[in-house]
């Protein structure tokens, strides 16, 4: 009996609420719907991204979310869209759909808005609107990669609930970083990288004690400086990600690195293009680094390190590193086995744009977890078989999935590569490899991509290439191959005829005419231009059904 009363009471209450909110609902929606329509009218929408914005219920429109009860708009998700039709080998066709034009201040009406995402659009010649400062319920504001220009409006600092602010990669945002950002005390994520800010990073950012991720620098047109006189960074104890790239006075401020060393939770640290030298780095005692077990990503690219001692320092400082980027330095010479043995989690190592010799590669043969190694544009001049012989005698030959040795001066012919049992991608382009690829050269049994373009290879393709059942991409363009095309396809028509998707033999001296290719059932891209092919394409020659040349 009592229960029934309660139920009836609740029913009545819910009807009353429903009516009350129902009315409110219609009023609220109407005003906010009107605001969205005004916004849409001012926007340039060449790609019809807002085409669904016509029906009566704006909560159903693309990119809009409302609360269930009150139907206020709480989320506006309007990022531009990149869709990439990815062809292998880096030839990709990207289509970009975006909005541009003016951001109408009618949006001020969306007082309940908590999430606003306008990233990846094109707001060239547009400033970040000041009125955004009145959307005081915002938690997430993402205006990244949209070409906004001018200064950050100080009004942003009124968004006291903001947890996430991303203004990265607009390129043209300039002026100084407003100290008022230090008032956004709930901020957990702040990304201002990839812009043209100048001057000092305001030490007020040290008040953002909830910050987990901070990305600064990665300049476009200017460099930031760091205040060294106070210890603002030391307040940011919750930081897990810290990117301080292109900070022009970092190398003259040892106290900064000393402060960073104390951050207890750091997982990713980037100090690229900070003018760091061997002397600077080696003067810090590895045992003072508080994040030694938490750090998994370390970027130190574009500095001026020269000595392999840096590797020792890194391995003494951090033991659980997964990714290390030391590209664009002046490193050379071999480091001791110690590095490989100490690095028991390292998966990605980027040493491109240094001056290593081929023989230095063996320093890394003992990293049993290594998946990818980039050593593009170094000073390797030795014979490929010698370079790989020493390297492949360590456990790395079982773990390595990607090896890139592009743009060295590596000589010799292509040796047997099957010893690298898990290699998926091998790029040897732009070297001095020459001669015929020996018939006995076997590829790693899981190889998916082999790129040896711009060398001086002669002859044709060995049959063993055709029996690599996973091979999707083969790029041998810009060599001196001169074999008959029909013979080459014959050699490739082992099980790789089912897997090959892209084949480039352009810029060679290949003879003959185009044979029947219908056996290559997955071939999508075939480049044969700039060769010495001749004759008619015989009547009845069949091409793979997906082919687009
Ligand atoms: C709003 O309604 C949807 C669909 O009825 C439901 O899935 C969601 O959980 C509700 N959200 C809240 C916050 O009540
Ligand atoms: C904004 O949208 C982009 C593109 O969909 C997405 O990658 C990004 O994570 C979104 N931002 C937030 C804060 O969710
Ligand atoms: C910022 O860039 C605008 C052009 O986008 C320019 O007019 C202005 O002078 C620049 N301001 C500063 C402080 O560099
Ligand atoms: C915001 O920060 C500035 C500079 O750090 C300070 O002067 C100002 O009082 C703060 N404003 C509010 C509303 O807290
Ligand atoms: C943090 O804010 C307080 C006032 O709220 C101010 O006194 C202090 O100087 C600020 N600290 C930093 C590092 O900006
Ligand atoms: C980390 O730093 C704190 C304070 O600076 C210190 O008390 C603690 O012992 C350090 N921990 C490690 C593992 O170094
Ligand atoms: C690294 O640690 C080893 C062993 O403790 C030590 O001999 C060596 O000097 C250290 N090297 C650097 C650069 O810290
Ligand atoms: C290979 O290792 C041997 C023995 O350590 C060494 O003598 C030789 O110079 C190395 N060659 C290359 C190219 O690394
Ligand atoms: C590259 O190595 C050669 C010796 O093989 C040396 O003469 C040259 O100076 C090196 N280049 C650089 C930039 O170190």
Image (tube, helix red, strand yellow):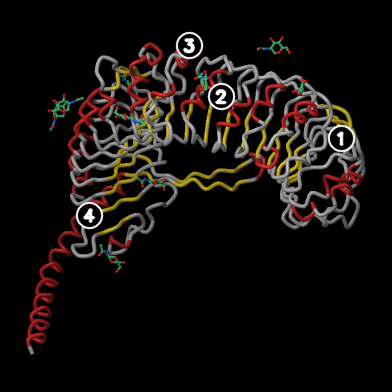
2 or 3: mark nearer the eye? 3
Q: Earlier in the sequence, mark 1 or mark 2?
A: 2
Query: Dots 1 and 2: beta carbons under 8 Å?
Result: no
Disc 2 secondary structure class: loop
Q: Earlier in the sequence, mark 4 or mark 1?
A: 4
According to the picture, the residue beneath numbered tag 4 turns out to be: 34
Q: Is residue 74 above or below residue 176?
A: below
Compute the Cα span from label 4 to label 3. Answer: 62 Å
Q: Earlier in the sequence, mark 2 or mark 4?
A: 4
Q: Please tell me in which quadrant of the rendered image residue 367 appears.
A: top right
According to the picture, the residue beneath numbered tag 1 turns out to be: 437
Q: Earlier in the sequence, mark 2 or mark 3?
A: 3
Quarter of the picture for ligand 4?
Answer: top left
Disc 3 secondary structure class: helix
Disc 1 secondary structure class: loop
Compute the Cα span from label 2 to label 3. Answer: 18 Å
Q: Residues within 10 Å of mark 4 (few under 14, many from 20)?
A: some
Compare residues 34 and 156 and report the one nearer the observer. 156
Compute the Cα span from label 3 to label 1. Answer: 45 Å
According to the picture, the residue beneath numbered tag 2 turns out to be: 327
**Picture coordinates of residue 175, whole percent (x, y):** 30, 21
Total number of numbered labels? Answer: 4
According to the picture, the residue beneath numbered tag 3 turns out to be: 279
Q: Please tell me in which quadrant of the rendered image residue 260 appears.
A: top left
Compare residues 220 and 387 and report the one nearer the observer. 387
Q: Residues within 10 Å of mark 3 (few under 14, many from 20)?
A: few
Q: Is residue 3 above or below residue 236?
A: below
**Picture coordinates of residue 178, whole percent (x, y):** 24, 26
**Picture coordinates of residue 304, whole percent (x, y):** 52, 14
Query: Dots 2 and 4: beta carbons under 8 Å?
Result: no
Q: Residues within 10 Å of mark 2 (few under 14, many from 20)?
A: many
Compare residues 473 and 255 and report the one nearer the observer. 255
């Amino acid at each position: 009996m009592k229960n029934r009363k309660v139920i009836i009471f609740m029913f009545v209450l819910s009807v009353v609420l429903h009516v009350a909110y129902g009315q409110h609902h219609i009023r609220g929606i109407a005003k906010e719907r009107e605001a969205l329509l005004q916004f849409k009218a001012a926007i340039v929408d060449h790609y019809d991204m807002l085409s669904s914005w016509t029906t009566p219920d704006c909560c159903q429109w693309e990119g809009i979310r409302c609360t269930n009860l009150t139907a206020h708009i709480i989320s506006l998700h309007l990022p531009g869209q990149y869709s990439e039709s990815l062809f292998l080998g880096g030839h990709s066709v990207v289509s970009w759909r975006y909005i541009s034009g003016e951001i109408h201040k009618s949006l001020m009406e969306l007082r309940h808005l908590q999430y606003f995402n306008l990233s990846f659009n094109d707001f060239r010649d547009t400033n970040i609107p000041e009125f955004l400062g009145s959307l005081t319920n915002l938690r997430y504001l993402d205006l990244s990669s949209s070409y906004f220009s001018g200064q950050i409006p100080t009004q942003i600092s009124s968004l006291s609930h903001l947890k996430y602010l991303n203004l990265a990669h607009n390129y043209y945002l300039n002026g100084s970083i407003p100290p008022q950002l230090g008032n956004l005390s709930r901020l957990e994520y702040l990304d201002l990288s990839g812009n043209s800010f100048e001057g000092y990073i305001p030490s007020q950012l040290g008040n953002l004690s909830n910050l987990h991720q901070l990305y600064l620098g990665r300049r476009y047109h200017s460099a930031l400086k760091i205040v060294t006189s106070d210890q603002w960074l030391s307040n940011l104890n919750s930081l897990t990600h810290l990117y301080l790239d292109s900070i022009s006075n970092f190398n003259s401020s040892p106290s900064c690195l000393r402060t960073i060393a104390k951050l207890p939770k750091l997982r990713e640290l980037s100090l690229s293009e900070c003018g760091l030298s061997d002397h600077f780095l080696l003067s810090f005692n590895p045992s003072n680094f508080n994040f030694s077990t938490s750090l998994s990503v370390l970027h130190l690219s574009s500095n001026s390190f020269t000595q392999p001692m840096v590797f020792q320092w890194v391995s003494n400082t951090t033991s659980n590193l997964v990714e290390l980027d030391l590209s664009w330095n002046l490193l050379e010479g071999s480091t001791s086995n110690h590095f490989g043995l100490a690095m028991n989690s390292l998966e990605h190592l980027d040493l491109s744009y240094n001056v290593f010799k081929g023989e230095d590669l063996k320093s890394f043969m003992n990293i049993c977890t290594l998946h990818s190694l980039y050593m593009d544009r170094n000073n390797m001049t030795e014979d490929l078989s010698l370079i790989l012989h020493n390297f492949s005698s360590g456990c790395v030959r079982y773990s390595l999935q990607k090896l890139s040795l592009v743009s060295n001066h590596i000589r010799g012919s292509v040796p047997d590569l099957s010893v690298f049992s898990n290699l998926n991608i091998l790029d040897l382009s732009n070297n001095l490899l020459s001669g015929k690829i020996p018939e006995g050269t076997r590829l790693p049994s899981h190889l998916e991509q082999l790129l040896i373009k711009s060398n001086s290879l002669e002859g044709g393709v060995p049959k063993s290439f055709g029996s690599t059942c996973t091979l999707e991409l083969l790029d041998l363009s810009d060599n001196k191959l001169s074999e008959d095309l029909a013979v080459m396809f014959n050699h490739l028509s082992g099980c790789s005829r089912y897997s090959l998707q892209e084949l480039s033999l352009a810029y060679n001296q290949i003879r003959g005419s185009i044979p029947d290719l219908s056996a290559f059932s997955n071939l999508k891209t075939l480049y044969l231009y700039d060769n010495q092919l001749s004759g008619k394409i015989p009547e009845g020659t069949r091409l793979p059904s997906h082919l687009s040349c």
